[in-house]
Amino acid sequence: MSPKVRTVRYLDFLPDSFDGGSNQTLGVLSQEGIMRFINIQTCKQIFEIGSHEDAISSASISPKGHHIVAVMDSGALKIYDVRSLTPDISQPPQPLLKKVTKGNSNEGFCLKVKVQTGTGQHPVKTSGRRIQTKVLPRPTASTLDNKEIDLPNGLNRKRLQALLRAFGEFPAKYRMFIWRSLLHLPENHAAFSSLTNKGLYSAYMSLQERFPIKSHKLQRGLQRVLSALAHWAAVFGETDYLPLLAFPFVKLFQNNPLICFEVVATVIVNWCQHWFEYFPNPPLNVLNLAENVLAHHDRELLQHFVACGVTSQLYAWPLFETLFSEVLIREEWLKLFDNVFSNHPSFLLMAVVAYVTCCRAPLLLCTDKKDFEYFFHHRNSLDIGAMLKEAYRLMENTPADIHPSSTLSEFEPLTQGQYPIFNKYPTFIVEYQSQERERIRHQEVEYLRERQEVQELHAEAVRQQAEFEAWYKQQELLVQGEEQHRRILQEEENKLAEQRARLAAMKRELKVKELNLIDSARRRFLKHQQDQRRIQLQRLDDEIQRKMVLRDQETATAVHDIEVRQMELDAQRHLFEQQLAKEQEQVSQEVNAEVETRRRRAEIEDSTLHNLIETDADLSQKNKRVMEESLAEVGQMEVDADWQAEVIKRLQKTEERQEKQRDQLVNLCKQTRAKEEEIVQLMVEVEGKQWDDVLAKQAELDEERQAAVNAQWRSLISQETETKQHQGKLQKSLEDSLNHQKEKRLRSSCSSRGLLHKPQIKTTNISLNNQSPSDNSSYFSLDRGRGELDCKERELMDEIRELRTKLAARARVTDFNSTSAISSIHSH
């Protein structure tokens, strides 16, 4: 770096689309705000962004390396186009030109393959590249004529293996394409989408805690692939070393998760055969195969491992579970898997044994178990080409009885449409571990929830404490501010008091001067006033003398006038006394007339009431008399009952002819009896009501006498109305009693005549309805009684009308007198 760079704030590689994933350009952001991009192969600076005037605060590079986003110290956000900054970045490599020529040599007929950079017609010279020439043995006729294509996309496995033997690796530009062809990837988009749609597997939600990765993109990609594998087979959710196995493929295929998943699944199905039979323990059967091969080819090294207590789980299993990703760099790892994918699945096991045998020199020097652990978990100085040659030698020279190919099956690609079922593991252990892991996860979630609640409570307590402290601090500040304001107010009050003292002194001086002026003016005014008073006293003496003379004269005149006025007043007093005596006499006469009028009206009302009471008493006596007569007649009828019974026996024939009429008369008799009983009850009730009405009228009359004059007319009207009602009731009761008396008389006259036609009451009823000449007398007597009743009724009504007229006239006279008396009193 430049000597100006003292501190590096940020480092990041600039991705290149044509460097096979091995980024060659490193961006370095220094403390001066300038970001320099350096080629790590040539150690030369390619370009830089930012300046001292416009420094960069932070920067970020796009995933494809086309743009750089920088946040400047000024707050601006700048986006740089890498292709515009330099033309040497992201350019495709020169195409390869292969020429096959025939030639004779001392070794015999052979083929020379020249690989050079450039096009067919126009070769291009490039710096740092040279023509590579490789002498291949002459193929047999069967090899040259073999046109069979056993791989998709027009590739042939044998030709690819020959190319791999010749160059040691596939071209970086076409490596991914060749791998996809060798592994026969089905690219089942629908099946992979169904796996990813299930979401993250519960065991891999906290993957970043166990395997922290700086790149969030790689972290999410690894979680996605591992979750899909766990949803495909439950054992992959419980396998601890699966993230180590899948991570190199995730990093290599980070932009294509489907290919990454299928590559990892193909590797597990073919190159990880029999790995899960002893789950959760390491695959002891596979490790025994590797130990048998090592024992056959390098017994000394195996004995050294046994002597040091190192088992295959310590020297072989770390290489298997990480797929050499911990001990090899990127280029070496890619070369290794170029050969692994091109050979039988047992080649991976031979590669493990080859790695151990190629490192036998340092391993023989190690005696501590920790040294062996460190060795197989860290990178070592190893030639990958030599290791691959050793692997091929082991593949060819291992006896068939201990060769892994006899145990491991041939390569089987993934099926199209749906992925194959993977159940080559102890399911009960996986299910138990899954249940335990789920239980532990629930407990952990509950613990995290409780811890979160505790943290929230603690944060709330801290917040409240901070609020209290802030409040107390604010109160202290307020108290300090209040004290400061009080001090300022005290100082201002002191200044104001001083100013008031000075002002009071000035006012006193002015007041003294004013008092002096006022005193001199007062003395002058007093002198002037004394002079004026002296003159005024002289004038008053003269006026007093004149007033005294006038007063004597006016006194004599006033005495004379008073005597005359006294005489006039005496005359007026006598006149007024006479007028008052006259008015008093008139008022007393009016009052006496009013009292007399009221007394007469009361006497009339009392006489009317006594008349009504006497009328009621007469009616009650008449009713009693009628009832007594009816009882006497009934007794007489009972005496004559026996005689009438004999008459009935003699007139049986007549009774048969009038049987129908007799039934009607019986019903009429029953009705008459009921009416008589109702009349009696009604008379009793009317008598009680009359007494109640009389008492009520007396109370009303007392109240009306004490009420105002203007309410007398309404009381008289109400009395007249009640009198009418009472008279109507009396008239009705009188008519009923008269009718009853007439009927009784009729029955008695009929019974006294000794009518032999009907017995008891039935005879009377028959005589009323009979048209015979013998009944005419009773018929006419009934009509005469009704005429008398009508005459009495008309006389009673005339008396009532006269009484009503007199009451109305008396009321009008009384109202007129009372009104005039009141008006005269008011006028006086």
Image (tube, helix red, strand yellow):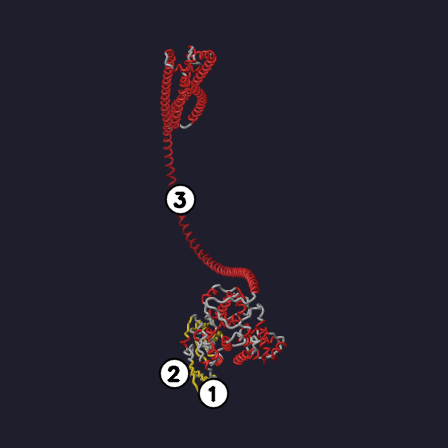
Q: Nearer the viewer, residue 747 or 225?
A: 225
Please tell me which of labels 2 and 3 falls first in the chain: 2
Residue type beneath disc 3: Leu
- SS label for mark 3: helix
In the image: residue 786, left or right of residue 339: left
Q: Work out how far the residue at label 1 is from the one at label 2, CA to CA, in angstroms.
A: 32 Å
Q: Quadrant of residue 360?
A: bottom right
Please tell me which of labels 3 and 1 falls first in the chain: 1
Q: Nearer the viewer, residue 708 or 270?
A: 270
Instruction: Provide residue 299's location: percent of width, then percent of height.
Output: 61, 79
Instruction: Provide residue 216's location: percent of width, then percent of height.
Output: 49, 69
Q: Nearer the viewer, residue 525 or 660?
A: 660
Q: Nearer the viewer, residue 106 or 508?
A: 106
Instruction: Provide residue 410's location: percent of width, then percent of height.
Output: 51, 73
Please tell me which of labels 1 and 2 falls first in the chain: 1
Residue at mark 3: 537
Residue type beneath disc 1: Gly
- SS label for mark 1: strand
Label drawn at residue 108: 1
